Amino acid sequence: MISLLTLLSKLFFIAAGIGGIALLIFFHELGHFLFCKLFRVHTPTFSIGFGPVIWSRLIGTTKFTISAIPLGGYVEIAGMDGSTEGNTPMANEEPFSKKPYHQKFCIMMGGILFNIILAFKIAMFVYLCGAPGSVLLYPETATTTVARVLPESIAAQTGFQEGDVITLFNGTPLIGRAEPLIRYLKTTSESVTITFEHNGEAQTTNPIMVEQGKPFGVILKTEKLSPLSFTESVTYAWQTTLRWMRDTGYGLMHILKKGDLSSAGGPVKIISMISQSAQDGFLIYLLFLAIISINLALFNLIPVPILDGGQLLLATIESLIGRPLPIKIREYIFIGTWFVFLGLILVLSFHDISALIAPYFDSIKQCLPVSLIGE
């Protein structure tokens, strides 16, 4: 039977997962909101969550609300539907539809930009505190000790084995950190000579031809970093943020090209993963939020009308043709897209829930008599 302490612990981590999602959405919508204010675009509502309103307050010309379902949020932007009437602006504010293209571009990219900035700030904070030895920060946390060698890889054919310690590459010494070597292997198509210690004996490979983008085949052990200086933290955080963006971009392109949703996740899976990361410590929790923030930013670049990329596409089309699209056409596009999007969310949520409850069914099955299971 689950103890009260265990139950409270689980509830706390679930709340941390939901709170993390709410934080990412808040920063995304804050980006839209601040650019709207910069260009004097009327924003009637700024909402965190959906459903029944728990709290609301009118500040200036915007009504800020917190709703009961914190799995989303939005900034209501006057004139986003292409109309120039309704949602009557106050003071010197105007609808979105009356603004020039460059201002519309900044407003739509504001949320994406803020998610990327948030990820960068989190990474910088983690490096300042002393980054944990997590694969989320690989190769920054990679040591020179080989943890595993992938079979039939370049490294396996060269003779690397678990426990080997890499000391030199192309004559350049590695002092505890393998990051320079990893970056070299990822960005070059030239030969490399590596010196490593195997059972205490130094060995040097013949020149190895590596191909850019092709895995070398060595997975190195990771360990906690000592706190870095401000300048070092900024440099490392920038490199890490760019790598997260690149890897996330490759992942999204794979899903879009192949139609393979096996690596995709809906709200249930995302909350579950953030909740699990919170159990591994505060810094791991923050790193996971940063990666999800990058995912949210790049996902919103997809040119689907209900996403920022789609809104930007419509604004670009209207700018090119010199007139707004008919409101009815916009409505049909949005309704159709919402149906497809909600269907995708339902499918992903079904798979996420099935994956979460499968272990419980397996444990129940093990407790049943053989005669009931039919084995």
Image: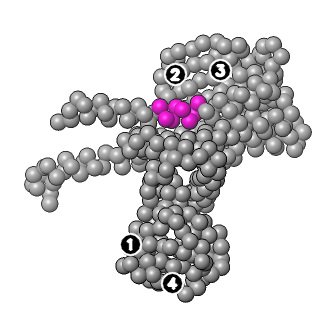
Q: Which quadrant is the C terminus positioned in?
A: bottom left
Please name the residue shown 62% across and 50% down the image.
232
Which tag is nearer the camera, tag 1 or tag 2? Answer: 1
Considering only order in the chain, which callout, 2 or 1, is on the residue closer to the N terminus?
Answer: 2
Considering only order in the chain, which callout, 4 or 1, is on the residue closer to the N terminus?
Answer: 1
Which residue is label 4 attached to? 204
| Structural crowding at the residue carrying mark 2, measured as other residues with C-alpha within 10 Å and reported as few (<14), some (14–19) or many (≥20) | some
Which residue is label 3 attached to? 45
> Does residue 268 show up?
no
> Does residue 92 show up?
yes
Q: Which mark is residue 67?
A: 2
Left or right? Give the position of 275 relative to 183.
Answer: left
Please name the residue shown 53% across and 60% down the image.
139
Instruction: Identify the amino acid type marked 2.
Output: Ser
Q: Quadrant of residue 253?
A: bottom right
Label 4 element class:
strand
Q: Which quadrant is the N terminus positioned in?
A: top left
Separation (CA) of disc 2 from disc 3: 12 Å
Give the residues drawn in magenta, as a range. 19-26
Separation (CA) of disc 1 from disc 3: 58 Å
